[in-house]
Image (spheres, grey):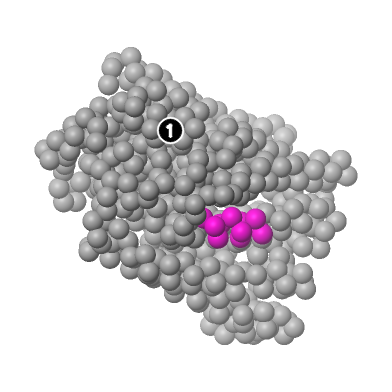
């Protein structure tokens, strides 16, 4: 063990970290803030998941069973807002907070107090958003895309929702600034950009995307607000405005947002697959360039969400072809992950199982995305359950599985304890089976013509809806095992070694487990950096 | 942390914040011009 880690041990014993509630309220440690983000994300995941189960319970049979249609619409809208802005994005920021300083050899994030502010904006934002469930007119019900004129007809929930979105956006932008500034200025000497782990790279690219597009969403919802309360007519045709302009602005944010939700997942999978294949990542630089290409392309594909709105033929062709181009860098990534495993000494611990499920199932989501990119086909698929199946394949076994993979992978480093591998594997298999029973039949429903965002449906769709709902309950309830594993690990897991995964490379594995409260107070030595370099 | 590193960090953060703010105002301005 190096001098650095000895020094950190010493720091760990007399670091005088604040105790009690103040430790969390005034937290400036990247680890504490990372933990808060992850716990918050978990709470939102279960709140959003409950809404999903209400939706699937209603759809278990044709006819109206449990909720009225207005409330059903609120559930689809709130489920999306909670899962995107409350569960997945804060989970990524939590993982970034925990891991980026450890991986680049920095003592903390560059702007710790801003970091605290970024986090604490979120509980306020989501309290406001969840309060809309109790205001006259109910929670927003026009879909997470907030298309006018429907969204402008919302009741008292409207200003609360807009303010909540502004707060979420501000939190994301400040978090992104922190990530960029940390990576650009706080890397230990010797950790050059191309020696930085892929997780840091994909997060760096994500952070630039966030800074570019979250203000666009903020601008769009500000204009909705002024249309609603201050007599402007940005999106009101009667006053000379254009509701379609909102869709263009929204999706200029919305498509890069999709990559914000998935790029860090690429980073995590690129860490886990080499570790459990006991081989370095195949084509490190190609992975970096592929991620950057995907990020660039995300800015020029937005109107593929709007083919049926109507646009010139040249527009259709441009957006169809630019969308298909994304398959190239994505294909490079999938190829490189497979090539990393080729002739590797593979073992199948829980993080690897989740990463492999990501590889298979995210690719299915990618392929259905290609189908949706084809303009004449999209005219058939638009607003059907095929779209719901597509983006849930990308987001659940894509983003959520890789968040879980990351948590299992780094939990020993965070807590100093090993999770229960048996329960972890049971959690994986129930999740993987449940998620496919849940979402795969939705492809069939969509191709058969079932529209999305409806609480009732024609009886011809009954069978696959029943199957899908059964899958939803299997998947939903199996997530309680995830909480059990984490709580059990923290309370009574076996002691973890400094390097619990023998194939693990990266500076985080050069620190003791648990990582000391202050880590890399002295930058890692050149020898350590050479040993742990990702490239 | 050295003073010049602190200064660079603050400058970088302000610059990125400025970019975000200009995107926000820029898109609203574009919409204003578009509507007119």
Residue A349's x, y, as percent?
43, 59
Position of the N terminus of chain A by quadrant:
top left
Q: Residue furthest right?
A: A313
Q: Where does residue A336 sit, x and y in percent of width and height?
A: 61, 44
Residue at the location (33% across, 51% down)? A500
Is any part of residue A124 visible from this angle? no
From the viewer's perspective, tell me whether residue A275 is left or right of residue A324: left
Foreground of the two, B1 or A250: B1
Looking at the image, which residue is at 54% across and 57% down?
A: A356
> In the rendered view, would you say B26 is above or below A504?
above
Total numbered circles: 1
Q: Quadrant of residue A180?
A: top left
Residue A512 in the image: state x and y as whole percent.
25, 43
Whether residue A277 sits left or right of residue A307 in the image: it is: left
Q: Quadrant of residue A332?
A: top right
Residue lying at 65% horizontally and 65% vertically, measured from the top left = A389
Q: Nearer the viewer, residue A49 or A126?
A: A49
Q: Is residue A266 shown in magenta?
A: no
Question: Which residue is identified by label 1?
Answer: A533
What subunit carries mark 1?
A
Q: Nearer the viewer, residue A150 or A47?
A: A47
- Which residue is at the front of the view, A137 or A438? A438
* Element on which disc 1 rests: loop
Q: Position of residue A214 (x, y in %)?
A: 54, 40
**One can see residue A513 in this view:** yes
Question: Taken as a whole, is the magenta stretch helix, strand or loop?
Answer: helix
Residue at the spot 49% in from the left edge and 70% down from the top edge = A429
Residue interval drawn in magenta = A355-365
Answer with left or right where residue A202 lies relative to residue A333.
left
Q: Characterize the local packing of mark 1: few (<14), some (14-19) or many (20 or more) Cα atoms within 10 angstroms.
A: many
């Amino acid at each position: 063990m190096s001098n650095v880690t000895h020094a950190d041990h010493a720091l760990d014993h007399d670091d005088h970290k604040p105790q009690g509630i103040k430790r969390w309220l005034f937290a400036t440690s990247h680890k504490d803030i990372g933990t808060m983000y992850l716990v918050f994300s978990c709470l939102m995941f279960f709140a959003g998941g409950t809404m999903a189960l209400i939706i699937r319970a209603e759809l278990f049979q044709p006819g109206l069973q449990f909720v009225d249609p207005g409330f059903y619409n609120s559930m689809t809208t709130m489920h999306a807002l909670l899962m995107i802005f409350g569960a997945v994005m804060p989970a990524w920021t939590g993982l970034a907070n925990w891991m980026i300083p450890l991986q680049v050899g920095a003592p903390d994030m560059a702007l710790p107090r801003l970091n605290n502010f970024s986090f604490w904006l979120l509980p306020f934002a989501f309290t406001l958003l969840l309060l809309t469930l109790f205001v006259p007119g109910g929670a927003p019900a026009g879909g997470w895309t907030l298309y006018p004129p429907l969204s402008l007809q919302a009741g008292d929930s409207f200003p609360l929702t807009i303010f909540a979105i502004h707060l979420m956006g501000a939190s994301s932008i400040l978090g992104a600034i922190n990530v960029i500034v940390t990576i650009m200025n706080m890397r230990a000497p010797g950790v050059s950009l191309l020696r930085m782990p892929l997780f840091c790279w994909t997060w760096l690219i994500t952070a630039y995307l966030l800074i570019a597009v979250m203000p666009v969403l903020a601008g769009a919802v500000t204009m909705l607000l002024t249309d609603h309360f201050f007599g402007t007519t940005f999106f009101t045709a009667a006053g000379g405005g254009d509701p379609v302009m909102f869709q263009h602005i929204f999706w200029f944010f919305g498509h890069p947002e999709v990559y914000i939700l998935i790029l860090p997942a690429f980073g995590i999978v690129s860490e886990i697959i080499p570790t459990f294949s006991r081989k370095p990542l195949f084509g490190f630089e190609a992975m970096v360039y592929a991620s950057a290409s995907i990020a660039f392309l995300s800015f020029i594909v937005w109107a593929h969400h709007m083919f049926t709105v109507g646009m010139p033929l040249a527009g259709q062709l441009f957006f169809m072809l630019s969308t298909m181009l994304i398959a190239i860098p994505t294909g490079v990534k999938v190829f490189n992950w497979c090539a990393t495993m080729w002739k590797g000494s593979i073992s199948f611990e829980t993080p690897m199982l989740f990463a492999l499920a990501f590889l298979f199932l995210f690719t299915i989501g990618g392929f259905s995305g290609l189908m949706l990119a084809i303009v004449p086909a999209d005219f058939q698929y638009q607003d059907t359950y095929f779209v719901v199946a597509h983006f849930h394949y990308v987001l659940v076994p894509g983003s959520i599985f890789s968040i879980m993979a990351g948590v299992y992978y780094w939990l020993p480093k965070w807590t100093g304890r090993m999770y229960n591998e048996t329960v972890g594997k049971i959690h994986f298999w129930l999740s993987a089976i449940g998620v496919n029973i849940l979402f795969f039949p939705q492809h069939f429903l969509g191709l058969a013509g079932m529209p999305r965002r409806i609480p009732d449906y024609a009886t011809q769709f009954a069978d696959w809806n029943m199957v899908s709902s059964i899958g939803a309950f299997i998947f939903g309830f199996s997530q309680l095992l995830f909480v059990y594993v984490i709580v059990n690990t923290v309370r009574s897991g076996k002691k973890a070694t400094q390097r619990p995964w023998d194939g693990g490379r990266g500076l985080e594995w050069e620190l003791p487990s648990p990582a000391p409260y202050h880590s890399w107070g002295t930058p890692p030595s050149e020898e350590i950096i050479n040993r742990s370099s990702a490239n | 942390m050295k003073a010049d590193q602190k200064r660079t960090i603050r400058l970088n953060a302000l610059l990125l914040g400025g970019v975000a703010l200009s995107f926000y105002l820029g898109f609203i301005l574009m919409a204003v011009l578009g509507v007119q």
